[in-house]
Image: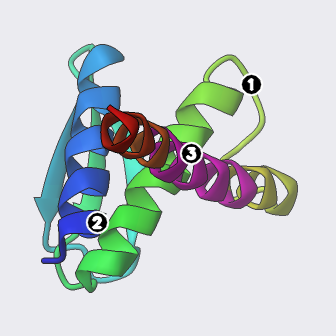
Amino acid sequence: MTARQERQWAALLKEFSSRQIELRCVPLHLSRGGLACHKGKWFCLISDFSSLREMIETAAHELAHWDLHQQDPRETGDPSLELEAEEGGKAILSMMERSYGDILADSLRW
C-alpha cells in the first residue's frame, strides 16, 4: 500500500463513519461493491477480490451514490445514476488529494 493509498483509504473510512455507514471488505464475486441496509444499519460492501486501487475507487463511487442519491427513489443500476456516481467518486478522491496537498504545502511554508 502506498502512502497515497493509505491516506485515501483512511479518509474514506472517516467519511463513511461520519455518515454512520460501516465500510466492509467482503468476498463479492459479481460486483465490485455496493450499499446495503440491514436491520436499519447501512453498510458499504467492497469486493476484496479487487485491487487496492479498485477498492478505493469503488468506495469513493459508493460514497458519491450515498451523497447524491440517498433520497432518490430511482433503482440502482440506472446508467445515469452510475455515471453521476462515477464522476462524484472521482471528485471525492480529487478533493481528498487537493486537501492533503494544501495541508502539506502549508506545513512546508512554515
Q: Which residue was labeled with disc 2?
A: 4
Cα separation, mark 2 vs mark 3, equals 14 Å
Q: Which residue was labeled with disc 1?
A: 72
Of the residues under marks 2 and 3, which one precedes in the sequence?
A: 2
96 sits to left or right of 88: left
Residue 30 spot, x, y in % from top left: 37, 81
How many other residues sit within 10 Å of disc 1, few (<14), some (14-19) or many (≥20)?
Answer: few
Mark 3–mark 1 CB contact (< 8 Å) = no
Residue at image location 20% in from the left, 85% down from the top = 49
Residue at image location 74% in from the left, 57% down from the top = 87
Task: Tell me, for residue 92, which label it has, or none.
Answer: 3
Instruction: Work out which residue is located at the far front of the displayed protein and give it.
Output: 110
Q: Is residue 20 visible?
A: no
Task: Tell me, for residue 89, which label it has, or none.
Answer: none
Mark 2: which amino acid?
A: Arg
Of the residues under marks 3 and 1, which one precedes in the sequence?
A: 1
